[in-house]
Amino acid sequence: MSTVNATDVSERAATTPATTGNRVLLRVSGLRKTYQGSSYAAVDGVGFEVREGESLVLLGPSGCGKTTTLRCVAGLEQPQEGTIEIGGAAVYSSEHRILVPARQRQLGMVFQSYAIWPHMSVLDNAVFPLTAVPRRRRLRRAAIRQKGLETLELVRLAEFAKRRATDLSGGQQQRLALARALIGNPRLLLLDEPLSNLDERLRRDMRAELRELQRRLGITMVYVTHDQVEALALGDRIAVLREGKVEQLADPQDLYEEPVNEFVARFLGFSNILPGTVQSRDGELGVVSTALGPLTCRVPPALAAGDAAVAGFRPACAVVTDGNTVEANTLSGTLESSIFVGESWECQVRVGDALVRVTSRARPPGALGATVSVTVPPREIRAFAP
């Protein structure tokens, strides 16, 4: 595999016709990556596009290939097959034997571990990428300092410029890592689970800060996480990965409301999954027979009467009552557990041989062992192909 220098990249980009509107900045196609000694593909045919100013989130469980995909884009891993184009120019192509080194891809990256230099000040950490370039291309010292202070101002750290980096809090260190990634004006910002080491309150605050900064600066971003809340909050579009493949790519609302299969549904909170068969359908709604009885639910066009299916719903979509409800999709069972978790009650109701999970704002009626009803509105239940 030959290497290509940055001049070659710029020349190829200059010959690429501009598209109307936000052009595609990153295009990944047919990406495949296996590790030595293993036949298992960590990334198996992954493909997606990211437009200028867009935030794409790669979402999935551990080992699904999301971080490996990100590292291939960054040039930190070399795939065996596929193409990666940035700004219309290939930085990797197995077919044309192109491999642009990571340092020439003009990318910024924020890692899960902040990678803060403990012996440097906050300012020195932020400007490190500007001081690490060859002397002939390096800015003057005063210009580097000014650029560093301006970038620290973006992430609200300018007042800590002289402080040792290790004296910062966790959230401040994360903002410093972000400043260091932004200081070189990267074409693309890559983030690998950067908030996972923070507590819940800091994660919530940093999500909001990062999203506001990304939108304000128009940064093109690819963000890796296993947390669905982070994905929904930070992504203009979300790609759900499983075993090295993209299961679904959609905007946050479509993904949340219309998962395409059981895997995506489970990952996005459909913890009540009931195998069954489509009995009938009438437009968008249909009836799926399950071990708990027939459930009226939304049925996708691909499923017809007689097809095997699974019906699923989120715990927060169900309501527990005292057992006298006669609405559609009402299941009678026994209250087996009820746990108060602050904003809600997490309940489990035994219906036949199955446990139905319910999250309720109100305290469930009756004591443990009481007969209760669980009701789920038909449009809150989604049928999937098994």
Image (cartoon, rainbow, N blue to C red):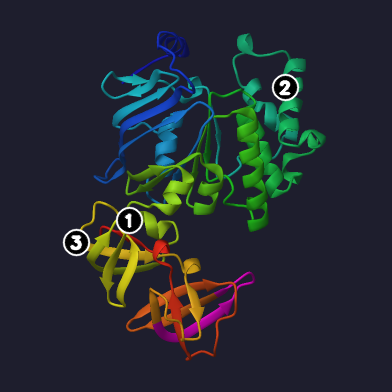
Which residue position is annotated with label 2?
Answer: 147
Q: Secondary structure at mark 1?
A: loop
Q: Quadrant of the N terminus?
A: top left
Which of pointers 2 and 3 indicates the residue nearer the eye? 3
Which residue position is annotated with label 3?
Answer: 307
Which residue position is annotated with label 1?
Answer: 284
Give whichever of discs 2 and 1 has the lower sequence position: 2
Instruction: Give the spatial CA distance, label 3 vs label 1.
Output: 16 Å
Name the magenta segment's main secondary structure: strand
Using the rendered view, name the quadrant where residue 209 is placed: top right
Residue lying furthest left: 306
Give whichever of discs 3 and 1 has the lower sequence position: 1
Question: Where 49 sits versus 248, above or below?
Answer: above
Instruction: Give the spatial CA distance, label 2 vs label 1.
Output: 56 Å
Instruction: Give the spatial CA distance, label 2 vs label 3.
Output: 62 Å
The answer to whether mark 2 and mark 1 are in CB contact below 8 A is: no
Which of pointers 2 and 1 indicates the residue nearer the eye? 1
Q: Position of residue 132 (x, y in %)?
A: 61, 22
Camera-side residue of 106 and 127: 106
Q: Secondary structure at mark 2?
A: helix
Question: Where 58 sits versus 2, above or below?
Answer: below
Taking the image as drawn, is residue 116 in sight?
A: no
Image side of residue 226 versus residue 342, left or right = left
Q: Secondary structure at mark 3?
A: loop
Q: Amino acid at mark 1?
A: Glu
Q: Amino acid at mark 2?
A: Lys
Camera-side residue of 303 and 238: 303
The answer to whether mark 2 and mark 3 are in CB contact below 8 A is: no
The tag on residue 174 is: none
Q: Quadrant of the C terminus?
A: bottom left
Residue range highlighted in magenta = 332-345
